[in-house]
Image: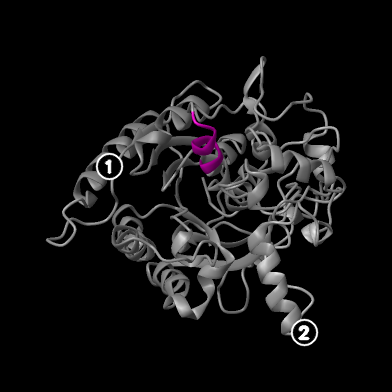
Amino acid sequence: MNDAAAVSGFHVVDFFCGAGGSSRGLVSAGSRVLAGIDRDPEYRATFVANNGDADGNPAEFLTLDLLPRKAHYPGGQRHEALAEIGRIVEAARAEQRRPLLFVFCPPCQPFTSVNRGKLSSDMEESRKQDKGLLYHSLGYIDHFRPEAVLCENVSGIQDRKFGGVWQHFEAGVAALGYHVASAVVDTADFGIPQVRRRSILIAVRKDVFAGDPSTLDGEGRLVIPTVDTEARRVTAREAIGHLPRLDAGETHPDDPDHRASKVSDINRLRLKAAPEGGTNEHYRGTDLEVGCHSRLRDRMDKDGRRSGGYTDAYTRLYADRPAPTITTKCFSFSNGRFGHYDRGQDRALSIREAACLQSFPEDYRFITPSISAAAKMVGNAVPPKLAEFYARHLMGMVGS
């Protein structure tokens, strides 16, 4: 075991970085994000604007497809990615010696039951490629040998119906000479004002491991914390209740991300009728009931069932509980429990409110003119406080 002092921060490469949720958490933990990598250039402005370190060092954004180029997949840019990562890491190490942390948060859509309707052939192919991203990520770990690894995804990725993707990745990291651990956690247990179940994997290269003996089990696996014992559960009211009042379709003059989507006349009536929390059952038998909900309930009644279906859609948050999972549709009242809990604000969540519920700092800017694109950035992000917690935990196990 290496007895050197624990590190104060990492050099970080954030794979599949999106708008930078994990990077923001790592910066808050004292690390320097060298680069974020994502094949969608729409994230560039937001990522770069928000993820420089405390010393003013900017984070690069690489628009690259991390898969290898094949005859059937000519868009792969693995060769270019290896060269660019090598360039960036070498330059950073020449300037300051810090251990290297690789973060992998690949797209979760192939491993979620949300929106599992019929997909176009192009979308089917894209999902198929995305399922292999963790497998190909092992090659980047093997090539660069980072001192530590952090991986996050939806809890469902561990279901064997997805072909053992998570289990293969975990075993692959261990085979490369790392102490590894993984678990399913709820972000509400880390002081994040949202219920969000996620799969987490952490790993430390064995030759630099400097953790306390209690951080390893009898089989040499890391013991992974699944709760922040210093945090308490935070409610929606505590997270967003201080933000200025906003009407549907309005943008606050002092915060361009405190903007809310418009609502139709019928949805405005539904909002006025919707109590804080609860389900949409109170629309039953009224002119406000959604047609598809009515038909579903009729079938349920015939089957003798009294629950099921999308009962959270067209409803308001509970004020004094953590919010439900923030999704890419968090700006829309019709797509979940995303109505503001305040009966005086008949609208869905603003982008700023959704970001606060994800634990983004209030000065984080989502640079896009489209409210749906901003919601996608927020909903797909790793909650920054979750990444910060595990970064700090890993720092205590890596020797300087």
Q: Residues within 10 Å of mark 2 (few under 14, many from 20)?
A: few
Category of crowding for the residue at label 1, using alpha-carbon neighbours closer than 10 angstroms: few (below 14), some (14–19), many (at least 20): some
Picture layout, residue 297 above or below residue 262:
below
Q: Secondary structure at mark 1?
A: helix
- Say which residue appears at 21% left-offset and 44% top-offset: 80
Res 71 seen here: yes
Question: Considering the numbered disc 2 on the image, is that residue within a helix, a strand or a loop?
Answer: loop
Mark 1 belongs to which amino acid?
Gly
Residue 42, given in percent of the width and then of the height, sits at: 39, 34
Residue lying at the far bottom of the rendered structure: 303
Asked if residue 338 lies left or right of residue 177, the reply is right
What residue range appears in magenta?
Answer: 370-376
Residue found at x 42% / y 69%: 169
Residue 53 position within the rendered picture, expressed as x and y whole percent measured from the top left: 52, 28
Which label was assigned to residue 86? Answer: 1
Contact between labelled residues 1 and 2, with CB atoms less than 8 Å apart? no
The answer to whether 151 is drawn above or below residue 89 in the figure is: below
Q: Residue furthest top?
A: 253
Q: Is residue 233 above or below residue 376?
A: below
Front residue of 177 and 66: 66
Question: Residue 151: percent from the left, percent from the top?
Answer: 50, 57
Residue 31 among those drawn in magenta: no
Q: Is residue 371 magenta?
A: yes
Residue on which the image places disc 2: 304
Q: Nearer the viewer, residue 178 or 60?
A: 60
Left of 352 or right of it: where is 148? left
The disc labelled 2 sits on which kind of residue?
Gly
Q: Residue at x 30, y 37 (%)?
A: 90
Residue in the image at 63% along x and 62% along y: 292
